Image (tube, helix red, strand yellow):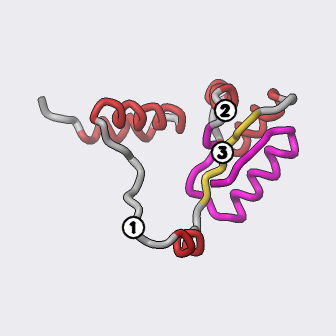
Amino acid sequence: MALDTEKIIEDLKGASILELNDLVKAIEDEFDVTAAAPVAAAGAGAEAAAKSTYDVELTEAGQEKVKVIKAVRDLTGLGLKDSKDLVDGAPKNVKEGVSEDEANDIKAKLEEVGASVTLK
């Protein structure tokens, strides 16, 4: 059985972030691997100083769930259903690999509508 690489790439381009996240988890489970990058044997201080990207995790939606869904939708460009699924599945990453300024901006917008957010 040969893989149709171009079709796979096209399918991935059309997938939502949540679908891609589910795919990665399924591959990790099926093949007993991890998608995490290997960590060099450096001290924790060097790692913290070199941190240039952040993941923004929605830890809890809070009391104003509808407002949080709207904010997630605006911030991510996801559709309504995907945004709702992300908020319902909290804790989940809203965005990954963003700059510190963008991460703080996203955090502020989500906290403004009552959500709890963690930067990683």
The type of residue carrying mark 3 is Glu
At label 2, the amino acid type is Ala
| Helix, strand or loop at mark 1 | loop
Furthest-left residue in this view = 1
Kindly identify which residue carries mark 1.
Answer: 40
Rounded to the nearest angstrom, the CA distance separating label 1 from label 3 is 24 Å
Image quadrant holding the N terminus, namely: top left
* Crowd tier of the residue under label 1, counting other residues whose Cα lies within 10 Å: few below 14, some 14–19, many 20 or above: few
Residue displayed at 63% across by 63% down: 99
Relative to residue 6, is residue 69 drawn left or right? right
Q: Give the mark toward the camera: 2 or 1.
A: 1
Distance between the alpha carbons at the discs numbered 3 and 2 = 8 Å
Q: Earlier in the sequence, mark 3 or mark 2?
A: 3
Label located before the other in sequence (2 or 1):
1
For residue 117, above or below residue 80: below
Q: Is residue 96 above or below residue 60?
A: below
Residue 106, x across and y down, in percent: 74, 51
The magenta segment:
92-120
The residue to which callout 3 is attached is 57
Question: Would residue 66 be found to the left or right of residue 83 on screen?
Answer: right
In the image shown, does 73 or 87 lie closer to the viewer? 87
Disc 1 marks a residue whose amino acid type is: Ala
Q: Secondary structure at mark 3?
A: strand
The mark nearer the N terminus, 1 or 3, is 1
The x, y position of residue 35, in whole percent, is 38, 47
Residue position for label 2: 90
Instruction: Choose mark 1 or mark 3, whichever is in front.
Output: 1
